[in-house]
Image (cartoon, helix red, strand yellow):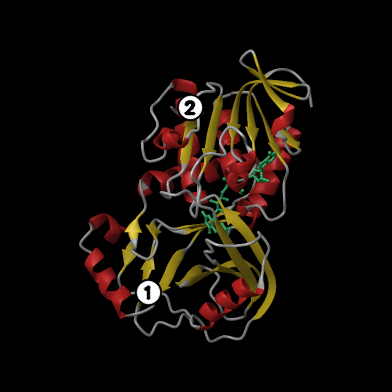
């Protein structure tokens, strides 16, 4: 890799950092992406599911149509760049957990945007146990995130734009408006560090509320590969008869490792979902970069004008990242305003030097 000056240093090669790299490359900008490539980063263990309907209250995601358009466009481009298809379109067959959920769902059908994504009567014949009824969500699917990350990082390496390394903030200096990292010089730094934001002395004041998640890989014959099944947890096809079961949401946790508590919770929910025999073959855990108000975090550091952040993707990394990476790129390259819902300035009162 050559040591010439580049415009951007991207710190972190999860979904956020890689989507920034893709957008900057698309705009012909020079950059280096540095990632320490741990096996259990949130992006690497995620099921990569995208679903325009959010949470227990079943609301349509913020800017759902734009997010979906950007996602499909990005992975259409990756198919051309990397020669592989990573995005699988799949309807979600979802069961109600109780009568209240079914009633709440009925009330939501008055919303035309919600109805747009819903089949009230499930057409799928799947082994999902649905004693309170079921429905389908369309516009959903999953991205093979682990495979895409591996392939795109290798592509960036071959282009001379990737370095596997850990950046220690003690070794990176801001000198006369340029960032110095080893032999490299950059005009701007974009921090995409996921839950490790707290190791960054410039952004460790942000009000993240991190959430641990665990997933199981099970082997199970008789499950449909072309649908996502959902009832408390989801089942997403991986390969052959292997499916991913996820995920737990743990707000108080001791470490980022898989444990018996997470496994038992997932198994209990799985047994309420299907009656087929299965075998657990693997378990993973990771930490989601979730924020206090559940919004992503984009924009400029309050006092260092050549330092930026793209983080806080939370539970919906793959759906949000392509649209938000373009949004941040438009801000960086053209000064376009950032949506208030995701602008880092909404948290500026937390900044210690804000007085
Ligand atoms: C169990 C689980 C299941 C999930 N399922 C889904 C799902 O189905 N769909 C979905 O959309 N989202 C899902 N998510 C959420 C999704 O994974 C996150 O929103 C997303 O991965 C966050 O991406 P990120 O790039 O911000 O962070 P990360 O994935 O954490 O990536 C940050 C990267 O930066 C590196 N890094 C940090 N600091 C440095 C440094 N100083 N030097 C070098 N490298 C550094 C890290 O090691 C890491 O590789 C899930 C998360 C979990 C935990």
- Closest to the camera, between mark 2 and mark 1, is 2
Picture quadrant of residue 1: top right
Q: Residue 244 carries which label?
A: none
223 versus 49 height, above or below: below
Residue depicted at 47% across the width and 31% down the height: 299
Q: In which quarter of the image is residue 166?
A: top right
Q: For the view shown, which residue lies furthest in the left direction?
A: 110
- In depth, the one of 283 and 235 nearer the eye is 283
Q: Is residue 8 left or right of residue 332?
A: right
- Residue at 49% from the left image edge and 68% from the top image edge: 228
The residue at which mark 1 appears reads as 123
Picture quadrant where residue 139 is located: bottom left
Give the vertical position of 8 relative to 233 (above or below): above
Residue name at image x 38 percent, y 64 percent: 137
Asked if the beta carbon under badge 1 is closer than 8 A to the nearest atom of ligand 1, the reply is no
The image shows residue 13 at horizontal and vertical percentages of 65, 41
330 lies above or below 118: above
User: Between 355 and 240, which is closer to the camera in this rendering?
Assistant: 355
Asked whether disc 2 touches disc 1, contact meaning CB atoms under 8 Å apart, the reply is no
Give the labeled residue for mark 2. 302
Task: Tell me if residue 161 can be seen.
Answer: no
| Mark 2 closeness class: few <14, some 14–19, many ≥20 residues within 10 Å | some
Q: Is mark 1 on a helix, strand or loop?
A: loop
């Amino acid at each position: 890799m050559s040591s010439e000056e580049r415009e951007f240093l991207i710190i972190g090669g999860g979904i956020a950092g890689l989507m920034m790299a893709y957008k900057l490359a698309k705009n012909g900008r020079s950059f280096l992406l540095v990632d320490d490539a741990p096996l259990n980063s949130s992006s690497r263990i995620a099921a990569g599911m995208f679903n325009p309907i959010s949470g227990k209250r079943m609301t349509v995601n913020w800017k759902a149509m734009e997010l979906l358009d950007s996602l499909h466009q990005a992975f259409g481009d990756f198919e051309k760049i990397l020669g592989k298809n990573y995005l699988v379109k799949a309807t979600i067959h979802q069961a109600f957990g109780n009568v209240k959920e079914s009633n709440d769902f009925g009330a939501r059908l008055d919303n035309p945007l919600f109805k747009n994504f819903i089949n009230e009567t499930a057409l799928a014949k799947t082994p999902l146990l649905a004693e309170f009824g079921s429905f389908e969500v369309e516009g959903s699917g999953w991205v093979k995130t682990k495979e895409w990350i591996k392939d795109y990082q290798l592509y960036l390496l071959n282009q001379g734009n990737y370095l596997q390394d850990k950046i220690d903030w003690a070794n990176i200096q801001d000198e006369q408006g340029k960032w110095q990292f080893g032999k490299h010089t950059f005009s701007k730094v974009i921090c995409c560090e996921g839950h490790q934001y707290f190791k960054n002395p410039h952004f460790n004041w942000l009000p993240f509320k991190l959430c641990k998640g665990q997933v199981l890989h099970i082997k199970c014959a008789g499950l449909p590969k072309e649908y996502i099944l959902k009832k408390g947890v989801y089942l997403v096809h991986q390969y052959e008869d292997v499916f991913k079961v996820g995920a737990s949401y743990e707000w108080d946790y001791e470490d980022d490792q898989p444990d018996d508590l997470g496994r038992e919770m997932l198994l209990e929910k799985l047994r309420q979902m299907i009656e087929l025999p299965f075998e657990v073959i693997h378990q993973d855990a990771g930490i989601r970069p979730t924020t206090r108000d559940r919004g992503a975090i984009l924009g400029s550091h309050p006092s260092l004008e050549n330092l930026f952040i793209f983080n806080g993707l939370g539970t919906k990394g793959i759906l949000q990242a392509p649209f938000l990476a373009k949004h941040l790129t438009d801000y960086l390259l053209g000064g376009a305003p950032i949506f208030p819902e995701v602008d880092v300035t909404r948290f500026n009162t937390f900044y210690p030097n804000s007085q």
